[in-house]
Image: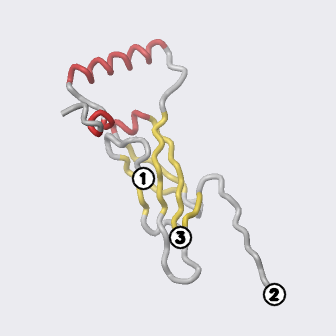
């Protein structure tokens, strides 16, 4: 007799061996200034991750031992949380003005984005 087991997709996680992967949306303010956020786990408990200031979109944080247990060993995988920095939409005129002022301050202060640094556009 053969038994075939099929796993169903989860709305939040996908599995890669014993590791679990998820995407965590954060605001660009949280990414720029840093923040502590809660992320879900497969067990339903909330886990805390500290997001350092300057975190870029796509950064992956590893939570060791928060994945799934291997069937063949005592190994437990990790929870890999990919950060998705969300861009605000439907801005009010005041918010647009503040963002334009912020942009001007960045230009005056010599501050740069990580993308410009990676492309070698800024020394």
47 relative position to 8: left or right: left
Q: Is residue 61 above or below residue 104?
A: below
User: What quarter of the picture does the N terminus occupy?
Assistant: bottom right
Residue depth check, mark 2 versus mark 3: number of the one nearer the observer? 2
49 relative position to 8: left or right: left
Q: Is residue 4 above or below residue 107?
A: below
Instruction: Report x, y in % for residue 115.
Output: 33, 36
Q: How many residues crowd around disc 1 within 10 Å: few (fewer than 14), some, or many (20 or more)?
A: some
C-alpha separation, residue under disc 3 versus residue under disc 1 = 17 Å
In the picture, the disc for residue 35 is none
Instruction: Report x, y in % for residue 52.
Output: 33, 46
Q: Earlier in the sequence, mark 2 or mark 3?
A: 2
Which residue was labeled with disc 1?
A: 60
Determine the secondary structure under disc 1: strand
Q: How many residues crowd around disc 2 within 10 Å: few (fewer than 14), some, or many (20 or more)?
A: few
User: What quarter of the picture does the C terminus occupy?
Assistant: top left
In the picture, the disc for residue 1 is 2
* Snapshot colouring: secondary structure
Asked if labels 2 and 1 touch by Cβ distance under 8 angstroms, the answer is: no
Q: Earlier in the sequence, mark 1 or mark 2?
A: 2
At 26% from the left and 30% from the top, the residue drawn is 112
Instruction: Report x, y in % for residue 106.
Output: 27, 24
Occupied quadrant, residue 17:
bottom right
Q: Tell which of 123 and 10 is nearer to you.
A: 123
Which residue was labeled with disc 3?
A: 18
């Amino acid at each position: 007799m053969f038994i075939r087991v099929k796993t169903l997709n989860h709305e939040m996680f996908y599995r890669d061996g014993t590791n679990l992967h998820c995407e965590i949306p954060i605001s660009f303010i949280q990414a720029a200034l840093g923040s502590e956020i809660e992320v879900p786990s497969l067990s339903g408990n909330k886990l805390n991750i500290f997001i350092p200031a300057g975190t870029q979109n796509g950064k992956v944080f590893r939570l060791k031992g928060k994945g799934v247990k291997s069937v063949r060993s005592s190994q437990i995988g990790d929870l890999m949380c990919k950060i998705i920095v969300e861009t605000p939409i439907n801005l009010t005129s005041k918010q647009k003005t503040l963002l334009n002022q912020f942009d001007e301050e960045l230009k005056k202060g010599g501050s740069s984005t990580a993308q410009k640094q990676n492309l070698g556009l800024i020394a």
